Image (cartoon, rainbow, N blue to C red):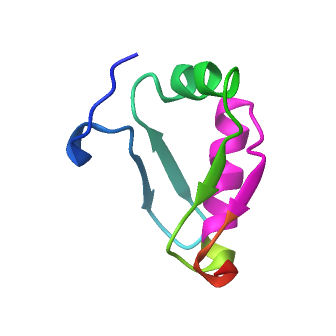
Amino acid sequence: LKTSLYKDELPQIEEVSLSKDVNILLLRKDFQLLIQQCCRYYEIIVWTSSNREYSEALVDQVENCIGFSFAHKLSIEDQ
């Protein structure tokens, strides 16, 4: 797995809304492999600075896409 300290090279998730009812979730190449490898050694916690409603919807989509459930999902509202 490629790792980096540079923000632009880290795995990123991008969501593009085409309309109110249609969302497309794009995951960076090898994101699923990264999560599979990391969860063998670490508890994975997702934190986002967006509101809970948006972040939970996005993380749920990611979980469905990669077939993995994160241990904890935290948003800015959990501070």
Quadrant in which residue 39 is drawn: top right
Reply above or below: 6 against 42: below
Reply above or below: 65 against 29: below
| Magenta-colored stretch includes residue 71 | yes
Quadrant in which residue 5 is drawn: top left
Q: Quadrant of the N terminus?
A: top left
**49 on left or right of 68:** left
Identified at 66% across, 42% down, the residue is: 44
Q: Which residues are magenta?
A: 55-73
Image coordinates of residue 65 in percent, x first then y, are 65, 36
Q: Main secondary structure of the magenta part?
A: helix
Q: Nearer the viewer, residue 22 or 8?
A: 8
Image coordinates of residue 59 in percent, x first then y, are 65, 54
**10 on left or right of 30:** left
**42 on left or right of 16:** right
Image coordinates of residue 77 in percent, x first then y, are 65, 83
Quadrant in which residue 43 is drawn: top right
Identified at 66% across, 50% down, the residue is: 45
**Number of numbered tags placed on the structure image:** 0
Q: Residue furthest front?
A: 41
Identified at 71% across, 53% down, the residue is: 60
Q: Nearer the viewer, residue 14 or 40?
A: 40
Q: Nearer the viewer, residue 25 or 76?
A: 76
| Magenta-colored stretch includes residue 1 | no
**66 on left or right of 22:** right
Identified at 64% across, 81% down, the residue is: 79
Image coordinates of residue 11 in percent, x first then y, are 38, 38
